[in-house]
Structures are given as structure tokens and as C-alpha cells.
Amino acid sequence: MRRLHRSSGRLEQGLLLLEGTHLLQEALELGLRPDLVLATPDWQERHGALLARLPDAGRLRTASPEVLAAAATTGHPDGVLLTLAMAQLPAPAAAASAPGFVLALDRLQDPGNLGTLLRTALAAGVERVWLAEGADALQPKVLRASSGAALALPIERMPAPDLEARLVEAQSHGVQLVAAMVPEAAGSVQPYWELDWCRPTALLLGNEGAGLAPELARLADQWVTIPHSPAVESLNVAAAAALLLLERTRQAHGRPAP
Ligand SMILES: C[S@@+](CC[C@H](N)C(=O)[O-])C[C@H]1O[C@@H](n2cnc3c(N)ncnc32)[C@H](O)[C@@H]1O
């Protein structure tokens, strides 16, 4: 389990580490089968109903709070840890071939930002997530911050040039590429509410420090911004994403059913 703290260990074992009652609940809701569940006697006493939902009770092991703390990435795990085979996660190839809504992230570094963003992406109906390098979406911090959304979305992490190729391919299938830019960005940037978000769309967001790579920004068909006071240069990327991703939902609500 400790080896699963690192991306190399996760790849080697083909497993993920999930920490806490909430992630166990989310995994079971999604129909995922834990490989191993490690829980303290006290936790097991308090969560009989949840344990009864385990697809395979033989996967449960009892551990002391000290052992659990040694296996966890957090200082104070709430009494349960589990491992999951990565092979159970949504396969990118299983998604529809012409995506309706894609979130593309350029070298996002902060696991908290990535997790928050993935949770919003799931709420907004994003069908695929493409990551150009940056934080690993399957690390425990991202899984916690996403509240399990990282387990439900088809997520692909790739080198930056591969993201460019993927976006060009999506464009050739009629998907509009929309770059999220800070208000002071040069060029023809429009307020985000002026865009038709109901068209097949790939939204591109940039790195926390450097913003969107110029070669990705150049690929875009539309450049949008969230206007705000010049007192700040930009918004936190996850805060910006919440407005942009949910604008599609807002516009769809205002339209008559097809
Ligand atoms: C913290 S900002 C990066 C700031 C960076 N110094 C720059 O000039 O782009 C990270 C990303 O969040 C998005 N973002 C931040 N504020 C935004 C705003 N007001 N409108 C649209 N997107 C925004 C952009 O995609 C940006 O690349």
C-alpha cells in the first residue's frame, strides 16, 4: 500500500490507493470492486452496513490504527483504506468517438486544483478529460479532492505534443476548441457567456503559473474570459473552470428540448 503512494508503484502493481469512508462509498456506488479493504476494528463496528455492500467480504483485512496510519498518505486516516485495480476504471476507448464535451488541461500542477476541477467536470457532464503532463489524476490527493470523481471519468494523461494532436483530431470532427484566457490576454477574447457552449466543445485551461501554452492557445477556435476586477491578474484555475464548465449546463437549461 505504501508503494501506491507513488505513480511508479501504482503502475507496477496496477492498483490505486483510496483513503477514507467516503471514497469507499463512492467506489461501491460506481460498481467498483476493491482489491483489498484494510480497516480498524473500531471502524468495522461502526460501518456494518457499508461492509455488507462489499462484493467480496474475503477482501477485508483488520489492522490496528497504527498500521493503517503507516499505510496511508494522510496523518489521520478515518479507519479504512482500500486498493482498486486500475483496469476497472472507465476506458478512454469505450467513450463515444466524437465527444460532445471535453476538458483539456495544460500541465496542471496542484493535486487539489485537479481534484476540484474533476469533480466539477463530472457535475457538468464532461465526457473525456485529457491531461497534458502535470499532476497524476490517480494519486491519493487528487482522488480525495475529487471526492471520487476521478474514478468515474475517462481520463488520459499524455505528453503535451500528443494533446495538440488529439485536439486537432477533435477539431476535424467538428468539436470547437475553446481556450480559457485571463482577462488581459491579447487577441480576440470574448466574455464566456457570449459563446454557444451547446456545440461539441473542448475547453482548454492553462497551468497555474504559466497559463495556457501559446501553441495550444493558437490552436483554439474561440478564446473566452471571465471578466473581473484588475485587482487580481487571474482566478484560481479550478474557480474559473467551475463557471466555464457549468455555463454549458446553464445554456442547455434555457433551450427548448430538441
Ligand atoms: C492561474 S491562471 C494562470 C495565470 C497566468 N499567469 C496567465 O497569464 O495565464 C490558470 C488558468 O486558469 C484560467 N483562468 C484564470 N483566470 C481566468 C479568467 N478570468 N477567465 C478565464 N480563464 C481564467 C486560464 O485557463 C489560465 O491559464
Image (cartoon, rainbow, N blue to C red):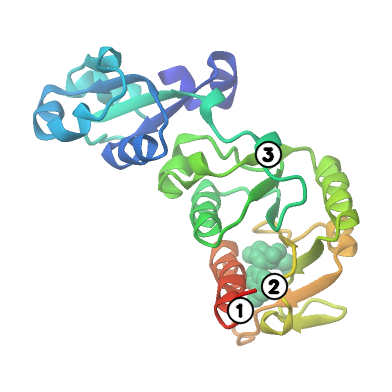
Q: Looking at the image, which is closer to me, 121 or 228?
A: 121
Residue receiving disc 1 = 251
When asked about the image quadrant of residue 181, the answer is: bottom right
Residue 254 on image: x %, y %? 57, 83
Question: For ligand 1, which image quadrant applies?
Answer: bottom right
The residue carrying pointer 1 sits among few (fewer than 14), some (14 to 19) or many (20 or more) residues within 10 Å by Cα, namely some
Q: Name which residue type carries label 1.
A: Gln
Mark 2: amino acid: Trp
Is 257 or 152 nearer to us in this picture?
Answer: 257
How packed mark 3 is, by other alpha carbons closer than 10 Å (few <14, some 14-19, many 20 or more), is some
Element carrying mark 1: helix
Residue on which disc 3 sits: 156
State the residue in front, 176 or 157. 176
Q: Which residue is drawn at the image coordinates 40% and 48% (left, top)? A: 147
Q: Do callouts 3 and 1 mark residues in contact (Cβ within 8 Å)?
A: no
CA gap between label 3 and label 1 equals 27 Å
